[in-house]
Amino acid sequence: MTSRFLLAFLVAAAACQDAHAVGTWSSALIRARVCLMAGGLLDMFSRHRTNLEPICLRDKACPVGSVMSRSSSCVLPAAYGYAREIAFTLHHPCDQCASDEGVELAGQLMMSLAGLLRIPLEEISVGVLIMNAQLRAAYPLEHFVLHREGEHPLISTSRSTPSTSRWDFFMAVRVHTSRLLETDSGLAVLLSSDPATLGRVMNFGQLHTFEA
């Protein structure tokens, strides 16, 4: 089942790692890689998952209602002719996330986002920023977004949420997909900007959305 699409998926997943953390992978991405290399399917479609992390399906077909993506993931079917691009930034206050330069948390969040929206990882791009409490107190973060060359600046009136943790983890996200309709429940949760709902659904405690 391995193919150039699987290789592209693994390269795209590794792109969320910090350049200084050579040889370091998030455990969530490692589990996904092991599943795919063993010929399994990543079920990102079913909702009964801890942290929304995909289940590895071995010798099984994708669940009814889903389709298999090029990266061997069970996801929402594409609504052809209906493309959507979403830009937002997630903020997660933490005390220990800087020990590995955010690699573990970035991988977990990336997999959970794919599970929340039920889309393949190759349709998600991310960038990570970690600030300590002293730096953020002196220089409050106003904007952190992924910006395409030639695109008008993406400026939001929202601001990141105050925090009492040692570190603030920010992940800027761009999603380009044709799988999400206006009525999608995962998209509604994400765009609600309700930290309690988003944190509960993704099982991450405090998880705030800004720049959406």
Image: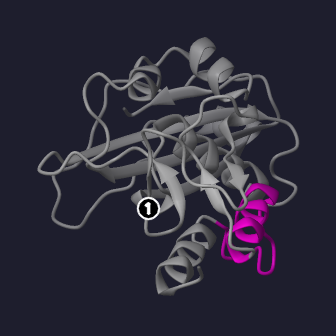
Farthest residue in the left direction? 81
Question: Which residue, given by chain and number where applicable, does mark 1 sit on?
Answer: 69
Seen from the viewer's position, the closer of residues 62 and 153 is 62
Q: Looking at the figure, which quarter contains the N terminus?
A: bottom right
Task: Name above or below for residue 123 compared with residue 180.
Answer: below
Determine the residue positioned at 38% across, 55% down. 146
Task: Name above or below for residue 194 compared with residue 118.
Answer: above
Determine the residue positioned at 54% across, 58% down. 73
Farthest residue in the bottom direction? 4
Determine the residue positioned at 47% across, 55% down. 120
| Residue 1 relative to residue 124: left or right | right
Q: Amino acid at mark 1?
A: Ser
Q: Position of residue 137 (x, y in %)?
A: 66, 32
Seen from the viewer's position, the closer of residues 144 and 202 is 202
Give SS at disc 1: loop
Determine the residue positioned at 38% across, 51% down. 174
Seen from the viewer's position, the closer of residues 91 and 58 is 58
The answer to whether one can see residue 17 in this image is yes
Q: Quadrant of residue 186?
A: top left
Task: Name above or below for residue 103 compared with residue 25.
Answer: above
Q: Position of residue 34 (x, y in %)?
A: 77, 70
| Residue 6 relative to residue 75: left or right | right
| Residue 167 relative to residue 87: left or right | right
Residue range of the region highlighted in magenta in the rendering: 17-37
Q: Quadrant of residue 196?
A: top right
Q: Position of residue 32 (x, y in %)?
A: 71, 62
How crowded pointer 1 is (Cα within 10 Å; few <14, some 14-19, many 20+) is rated as: some
